[in-house]
Image (cartoon, helix red, strand yellow):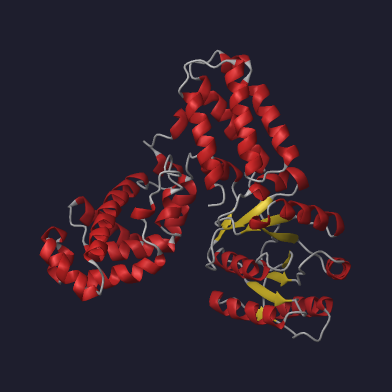
Amino acid sequence: MAFESLSDKLQNIFKGLRSKGKLTEDDIKASMKEVKIALLEADVNFKVVKNFVKDVTEKSLGEEVMTSLTPGQMVIKIVNEELTELLGSETTELSLKSGNEISVIMMMGLQGAGKTTTATKLAGKLKAQGKKPLLVALDIYRPAAIEQLKVNAQKQDVPFFSMGDKNKPVDIAKASIEHAKQNNYNTVIFDTAGRLHIDEDMMDELVEIKDTIEIDDALLVVDAMTGQDAVNVAKEFDEKIGIDGIIVTKLDGDTRGGAALSIKAVTGKPILYVGMGEKLSDLEQFYPDRMASRILGMGDVLSLIEKAEQTIDEEKAKEMESRLKKAEFTYDDYLEYMGQINNMGGLSSILKMMPGMGNKVSEDMLPSEKQLTQIEAIIYSMTPEERNNPDLINPSRKRRIADGAGVDVAQVNRLTKQFEQAKKMMKNMNGMMGGKGKKGMKGMKLPFGF
């Protein structure tokens, strides 16, 4: 995740605060100085950092905190609240019309930000919510972009509209609205052209489309990996075109992520969604409070539960849980389990949503998607008896299994370790997801005393 480094630094700072029985003014100021450095290193806008640290410091020096029995936890609570405020405070929804009335979404952004892929991801998400989306190719300058949108639309099983690259984008846009009316589509998504940098031709084209067609949501797609450039791009698009919301892509990458922390404060425009992976399903609604919790290492249990409900087969999960309770968790169950976990974004992604686990994820216990093929080969080299009764697997059997799968014995040993870790992990997850929504959080103790 983009904020992994920032999260680790903040957790270390707050660990020092929590260890103190009482806090002095100097303690708070010293900690806030470290917070300031951590935020600047994460590429958060300087003015945003300055105001954030000022507000947190003033509130932390208040009498309620200084005389509290747990002042360290009170300071962290203030940081959490201010971080949520910085990220936008409230979750923002699209301005979609009801019924069969057509809503129009215009996707904008620079070339390379992931606009075309994001348009398709959004179409798939809206389709799952009961909408009837139509993807429209308005990038007439890159035939590859038209083809990419068409291919992705087919993967999402979403209708696609194009008039090739010989017509003006505004004419294609008008024709697509008529096409939507005739075919009962109620959400039209324009994939507009991007450039490597902002230029007048691009801006004029977007203005013409917006002046001609009633746009319900003008969404700007920005790349988290470009840091403060993303914030500057958002400001310029808003001044020249007017934007209603922002989608931040590549937030799962090895990036400092400061754009996501700065963009709402600098532009005043909300983040609606974040792209958290390459799959067409990897687009998450943006919840400021949940993101703040993730950054501070408090987890994001609600998002985890929602993701599980969307991707895990409930009947199979019940069967597996029943076998787990009877200590009958097998290697066949493990393969099934790992498939479901990967559908949820991978075990690493899930662990980072669990309270206190963000900076404790060991790569040794996390098989990647590439390793899954090898894991399958090892498991299918076992006899049915060995798969059903893992205790049968002794050193000589491990050597036979390794030979059958074409791997070293060390890799078989690693799998057995991962199997035991998964067994424990599944027990924890089953306990956590004992109910729906917030009820599933009962009995869980969050870090920092919350």
| Residue at 66% in and 38% down | 85
What is the count of numbered marks?
0
- Quarter occupied by residue 290: top right
At x 27%, y 63%, the residue is 411
Q: Residue 194: x percent and y percent?
A: 75, 69
Residue 172 lies, in percent from the top left, at 79, 80
* Residue shown at the point (76%, 68%) measured from the top left: 196
The vertical placement of 405 against 395, above or below, is below
* 67 or 382: nearer the viewer: 382
Position of 225 relative to 167 (above/below): above
For the residue pair 127 and 413, the one nearer the viewer reads as 413
Is residue 290 shown to the viewer in this render?
Answer: no
The quarter of the displayed image where residue 330 is located:
bottom left
Most foreground residue, 6 or 52:
6
Residue 87 visible in the current orientation: yes
x, y percent for residue 390: 16, 60
93 on left or right of 303: right
Relative to 420, 85 lies left or right: right
The image shows residue 145, relative to residue 1, as above or below, that is below
Q: Where in the figure is residue 394, as x and y percent of width and height?
A: 12, 61
The front one of 381 and 165 is 381
